[in-house]
Image (spheres, coloured by chain):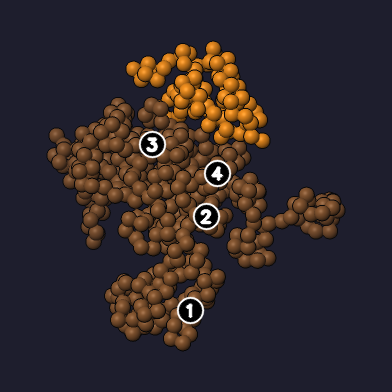
Chain colours: A orange, B brown
Amino acid sequence: MAVNKEELKQKILEFATKKAAHKSKMYIKDLYKADPNAKPREVKNAANELVREGKLEFFSSGSTVMYGVPGFGKTTEEAFE
Amino acid sequence: MADVKKHDTPMVDDLKKGPWPSFADDIEEKGLSGKQECLDLLGQLELSFKHKETHWKHGGIVGVFGYGGGVIGRYSDVPDMFPSIAHFHTIRVNQPASKFYNSKFLRKLCDLWDHRGSGMTNFHGSTGDMVLLGTKTEELEPVFYDLTHQMGCDLGGSGSNLRTPSCCVGKARCEYACIDTQEICYDLTQTFQDELHRPAFPYKFKFKVSGCPNDCVAAIARSCCSIIGTWRDDIRIDQDAVKAYMAGELKPNAGAHSDKDWGAFDIQKEVIDLCPSQCMKMEDGELKINNRECVRCMHCINTMPEALRPGTDTGATILCGAKAPILEGAQMSTLVIPFIKMEPPYDEFKDFVDKVWEWWMEEGKNRERLGELIQRKSLQEFLRIAELKPIPQMVKEPRSNPYVFWGEDEVEGGWKRDVKAFRARHAA
C-alpha cells in the first residue's frame, strides 16, 4: 500500500534524528525501519528528497552511501581530511 | 627506471607469438615507455600463470565520496614483489550513448589517465563503460574531480546498483533503428542518477536499448530490462528492389558473406523458406508477407535491405530478466510488453520500472537478479505486480509451460482443495 510521501518523510526525519544521537550515520536499510509499512523504494526516494531539501545529508564510507543528520557526527569533508 | 623490463616473463611472452596483436605487447610497450605499473602487472600475471591462481584481491572499501559505485577496488596480494600495483583500482566511466567521441576528448582522457593512473584502459568493458585500469586510492578523488569538472563525464555503475545503461548506435548510423536509442539511454541515465550512484538494490540491474530486433547490444541476453525497437504495422516492401535482388542486380546481405561463390541468389531458398513463421510467399511475381504472423526475426530485412524495411509505426518491445550464468544457468529476457510507443518523457515505461523495482527491492534476496526473482516467484506474480495482462506471446509452447493460472478470487464461486487428499492420490 502506498504511503503518503510527506508523512513518510516526517517519519524518516524523526527516526533518523532520534537515532543520530547515538549513531550518526545510517544505512538505507536502517531507514527502512522508520515505517515498516512503506516499501523500500518509497523510503529511499523520500530519504533522497530529504537530502535535496538539506534535512538529511549523504555520507560515504567510500563504497557505501550512508545517511546522516546535519550537525551530528563527522561531515563528509571532515572524514575526507 | 621503468624503461628496462625487470621481471622475467616467459609464459606471458609466449602470448605474443599468436597471429593477432597481443595485450602483452601493448602493456609491455606502455611499461617500457615509463609506466612501472604495466611491467609489474605483467610480472604478477606471470606469477599467476606459474601458481595457476590469481594474485588480485577483489573489493574492499574504496570509492569516491557521495558515490556508492563506479570504482572497483583491486589490490595485489603480493605487493612486496610488485609495489607499483599494490593498489590497482578500476574506474568505470559512463560512456556517451552509442559511444561516440571526438579525438580531443579521447586525448584529454588519455592525458588524465597517464598522469593519474597506469595509462591502461579498456574501450569498452562489457558493461559498456570506458574502463580506466589501475590507480592508487589517493588518486581516486582527483580523477573523479577532473572527470566531472573538466571532461563533463561521470562515473558508471558498479556493485548493487543500476549499471550504466547502454545502447546500440541507433538512428545515428543505422536505418533499421525503430526508436531513438541514444535519447532513451541518456534519459534513463539522467532520470535514475540516484539508482546509478547510490546502491539500494538487492543486486545489479541493467537496462540495454537496441534500436531493432537485430539487437546489436544483445539486450535480450544480458539485461534485466531489455528495450528493443520494433514496429506494429507492415514491413515496407519495394517490389522493384525485390525483383532486382532476384535478377542479381543487387547483392544480397548488402554484399556480406560473399567470400565464396554461393551461386545465384535464390529468394525461395534464402529468404522465404527460412522465415520462422512461414509468413512469406511469391505471388504473381510479387513478394507477399502475412505481417500478422511476423515474429521480427529480421532475416528477410537483413538479406534484402534495399527491398524490405521495418514499418513506420514504431516503438519498443520490453523484455525482462536476462542474466549471465553465475548462480543459475544463463537466462534470456522474457517478453512482458509487446509494444510500447517509447516517446519522451517515457512516463509509461518509467511507471512500469518503478513497479518492478519496488517489488524486487522488497522481495529480492541479497544478490538475486530480477530474472531469478521472476523464476522463484513465478511470471504470474511478476505480471500481477507490474499490472500487466498475460498474453499468448508470453507462453513459449502452449500447454508445456502454461504458467498463467486462474486465482481463486478470479473464478466465480472460487474453489476449495485439500492438498493432503490430493497428495494421497498423486505422488509429489
Q: Mark 2 or mark 1, which is nearer the start of the sequence?
A: 1
Estimate the x, y position of residue B249 in percent, counting from the top left: 30, 81
Q: Mark 4 or mark 3, which is nearer the start of the sequence?
A: 3
Task: Report whether B41 appears left or right of B285.
Answer: left
Q: Residue at x 42, y 74 (%)?
A: B237
Q: Secondary structure at mark 2?
A: strand
Q: Quadrant of the C terminus of chain B?
A: bottom right
- Distance from disc 4 to disc 1, alpha carbons, whole Å, reads 39 Å
Where is mark 3, residue-wise? B70
Front disc: 2 or 3? 2
Q: Secondary structure at mark 1?
A: strand
Residue B37 visible to the viewer? no
Front disc: 3 or 4? 4
Numbered disc 3: what chain? B
Task: Report whether B383 appears left or right of A65.
Answer: right
- The image's mark for residue B351 is 4
Where is mark 1, residue-wise? B288
Q: Mark 3 or mark 2, which is nearer the start of the sequence?
A: 3
- Distance from disc 1 to disc 2, alpha carbons, whole Å, reads 27 Å
- Distance from disc 3 to disc 1, alpha carbons, whole Å, reads 51 Å
Q: Residues within 10 Å of mark 1 (few under 14, many from 20)?
A: some
Mark 2–mark 3 CB contact (< 8 Å): no
Where is mark 2, residue-wise? B340
Amino acid tagged 4: Asp
Q: Mark 1 or mark 4, which is nearer the start of the sequence?
A: 1
